[in-house]
Amino acid sequence: MKHILCFGDSNTYGLIPQINGRYSWDERWTGILNYKLGLFNYRIIEDGLCGRTTIFEDPLRDNRNGSKILPTVLETNNGIDAIILMLGTNDCKTVYGATAEIIGKGIERLINIIKQYSITSKILLVSPIHFGEKVWHNEYDPEFSPNSIIVNKGLANVYENIANKENILFLDASIYAQPSNEDQEHLNAEGHKALAEAIYNKLVDVII
């Protein structure tokens, strides 16, 4: 059996837009991907945490810095065949004041950690879906700003360049899925299906 780690934030966790519940296993892109790959041949290891960043410390919530927990996750799950890394959405929050390039530095840090702790794992770097244009409004998520939308849209190009430099796989999630109308930030059920399909098509020839 092959093992695939999905390390991400609330869109890997499977947060239901506006309701803030969690999609069931067979509705989340991670679960759908596991079904598509085959439950007896592949095991998806979910590690999605709401609010997780690449390298930033959230002043309001503890344990959100991905670079601090990733080594532990990799050692706990020793022998991972592939790692899907999808972070950067929360790094766009106003409090961090980060550019797309700085967020890219955070992603590079995580890739270096993976290459140190899980040397043989294949890596798929996924740039996040785009925000809706109203994401920063009070009724949605005022932790973001109009500039967050610009930064978010710049991540795909930065990530793709990093993936090419690091010789790893890359996928731009925004090509395949959009944020929900309900909260302008998270995937709806259809988005989870679309992202699972895109990731499956990217991975299938590499890991089977």
Image (cartoon, rainbow, N blue to C red):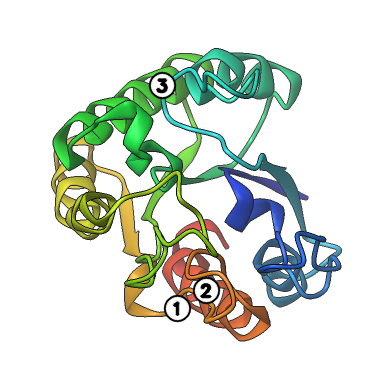
For the residues labelled 2 and 1, the Cα–Cα distance comes to 6 Å
Badge 2 vs badge 1, beta-carbon distance below 8 Å: yes
| SS at mark 3 in the image | loop
Pick whichever of labels 3 and 2 is earlier in the sequence.
3
> Which is more toward the observer, 186 or 35?
186
For the residues labelled 1 and 3, the Cα–Cα distance comes to 25 Å
**Residue 172 is drawn in which quadrant?**
bottom left
113 w.r.t. 205: above or below: above
Look at mark 1 in the image and give the residue it sits on. 177
Q: Residue at x 65, y 68 (%)?
A: 29
**Residue 112 is drawn in which quadrant?**
top left
Amino acid identity at mark 2: Leu
Amino acid identity at mark 1: Ala
| SS at mark 1 in the image | loop
Look at mark 2 in the image and give the residue it sits on. 195
User: Is the residue marked by circle 2 packed among few (<14), some (14-19), or many (20+) residues within 10 Å?
Assistant: many
> Which is more toward the observer, 113 or 68?
68
Amino acid identity at mark 3: Ile
Nearer to us: label 3 or label 2: 3
Badge 1 vs badge 3, beta-carbon distance below 8 Å: no
Percent from the top left, x then y, of residue 90? Answer: 45, 42
For the residues labelled 3 and 2, the Cα–Cα distance comes to 25 Å
**Left or right side of 90 for 37:** right
Q: Residue at x 50, y 35 (%)?
A: 121
